[in-house]
Amino acid sequence: MTVTISDIAVRVGVSHATVSRVLNSSGYVKDETREKVLKAIKDLNYTPSAIARSLSTSKTNTIGVIVPDINNLFFGEIIKGITEIADDNNLNIILCNTDENKNKELKAINVLKEQRIQGLIITPTFYRNSDNSENLNVLKNLGIPIILIDGHVEYLEFSGVFIDHIKGAYDGTLALIEAGHRKMAIITGDMKSRPAKERLLGYEKALEANNIPIDNENIFYGDYTQQTAYEITKKILKMDNRPTAIFVSSNTMILGCIKALYEEKINIPRDMAIIGFDKVDVLNIIGMNISFVNGPSTELGRIGMKMLLENLNSKEPRSIKRQTVLPELILKGSEKYIEKNENKINL
């Protein structure tokens, strides 16, 4: 049987309002009466309703988290970082996945609003769409702290934490150049997204800094999916004067690239060198040593959650704060250049 506030009130012989004041630590209650109420709560094993409490206080200890692709390890690790800090601060999380769909994102925002969340952490999908005004307006009118994780939007009213994608792609491309490559392809992400644009820019900057001409024939526009990366890699392999290396702009696309290379019996790095952006744990499990630029996703989650806590605990008006985190280049050998005529590795 569910125990209610009324049951406690009857047990102690006080009013419903008195029990509520004890539960919510609001209003005056005699110490003797408070002790009796607390004892009755313990004896009856009463558990307060979070929903009822939120209705009475207009506040919950819950935050919302919205990500575009929960199946992507990158976002899984962001969520891990968020929950680490949230758990330490007794905050609950409601997680929503949008599948890169603007309408699903709008629905998620409205659902979280109904749950009276204290704050929101979001990696937005809608920044890839030109018609994003409805989603943005709903966010702006939530009236709660909002933290972006690695996703700029048209408006700058939101704080956030971001990866330096330009540096990451620059360092990855530079590693290929320093290994001896001079003809390198890039498979970009969806060019409507900021990360894809910045990773392409980093690739181009590395070429320019090393006096290597930018060849548009080596720039292949992807969309962050395995299938598109697979198809693009097949095209690259059919080129008459094909590149000796490929910079792949996401962890999801690296799987499609590797699949195509495997089907064509292309050895990595002997026949084709590759570097990806963001790690893929399954490659380590199967012993495939693929070099990658590591976006510190778990740390992004931790920083984003700490930013949100600062906003929640601050008595001052919320100010816009943006932090950039540097990625790390992890070299495992797939970037190496092998002289075909000497059949040896140039280090």
Image: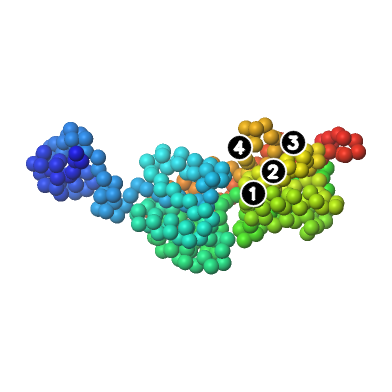
Viewer-nearest of labels 3 and 2? 2
Which comes sooner in the sequence, label 3 or label 4?
4
User: In the rendering, at what x and y percent does residue 171 appear?
Assistant: 71, 46
Question: Between 158 and 176, which is closer to the camera in this rendering?
Answer: 176
- Outermost residue on the right side: it is 341
> Within the image, what quadrant is residue 46 found in?
top left
As helix, strand or loop, the secondary structure at mark 3 comes to: loop
Which comes sooner in the sequence, label 1 or label 4?
1
Q: Can the viewer see residue 127?
A: yes
Viewer-nearest of labels 3 and 1? 1
As helix, strand or loop, the secondary structure at mark 2 comes to: helix
- Outermost residue on the front side: it is 263
Please name the residue that numbered disc 4 is placed on: 281
Amino acid type at mark 1:
Gln
* 136 on left or right of 326: left
Please name the residue that numbered disc 3 is placed on: 333
Q: Which mark is residue 226?
A: 1
Amino acid type at mark 2:
Lys
